[in-house]
Image: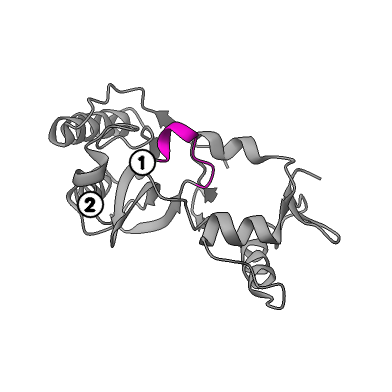
Amino acid sequence: MSFRMALIQMSVVGGDKSRNLARAERMIAEAAGRGSRLVLLPEVMDLGWTHPSSVTGAECIPGGEPCRRLSQAASSCGVYVCAGLTERCGDRVFNSAVIIGKNGDVLCTHRKLNELDIGHPYYAQGDRLNVVRTELGTLGLMICADGFAKDRVLSRTIIAEHIWDYHFDTGTNLIDVYINHLRNKVDTGFELKLIHTVRGVGYVLKEG
């Protein structure tokens, strides 16, 4: 199917959460008024990428103010919203993104997996990658440098130590279980497969 998607190029003022959210709400409404069904907002649009306020100003998903206000905007305008947010979870802060349904529910959350070195002082290593089936089609999330991982072979050890941040036990099948779970989301039912096993090494993301 085809639909109109709005790619929002908005100014994000570092640390000015209220101003950024107000601007996003206005632009979501404008996009909806022009017939868009999906509105895409920038990476960490609440506080700005690598802004020092990320450490203290990040809020939880979905209960924090940024996510609640974007959910309300999606519901009020009847559109899907995809937005990058600074997420607090316990004592960690993530460079995250959400897909919000037109009824205001958070359908999918992603935490950036391939953060650039400059972002490491502000954001923890991401630990999830998801897709969601909607009336518009199957939607997934990547953030900026996440897209650079194509054709890069990731060993089970790298996946365990850099995504879950713990020492890999070669006797466990934990990684395989989660890869199969991910395959069920992105490959099952589709002719084109994206996740491929590299025998004896790990996994690679590529088309074909």
Front residue of this view, candidates 138 and 205: 205
Kind of residue sitting beneath label 1:
Ala
Tag 1's secondary structure?
strand
Other residues around mark 2 within 10 Å, as few (<14) / some (14–19) / many (≥20):
many
Q: Main secondary structure of the magenta part?
A: loop
Q: Is residue 112 above or below residue 106?
A: above
Tag 2's secondary structure?
loop
Front residue of this view, candidates 207 and 190: 207
**Label of residue 83 in the image:** 1
Residue receiving disc 2: 59
**Label of residue 110 in the image:** none
View extreme (front): residue: 167
| Region in magenta | 113-120
Q: Is residue 145 above or below residue 105?
A: above
Q: Classify residue 22 as left or right of residue 184.
A: left
Taking the spot 54% from the left edge, 35% from the top edge, the residue there is 145
Taking the spot 38% from the left edge, 49% from the top edge, the residue there is 98
Kind of residue sitting beneath label 2:
Glu
The reply to whether residue 22 is visible in this rendering is yes
On-image quarter of the C terminus: top right
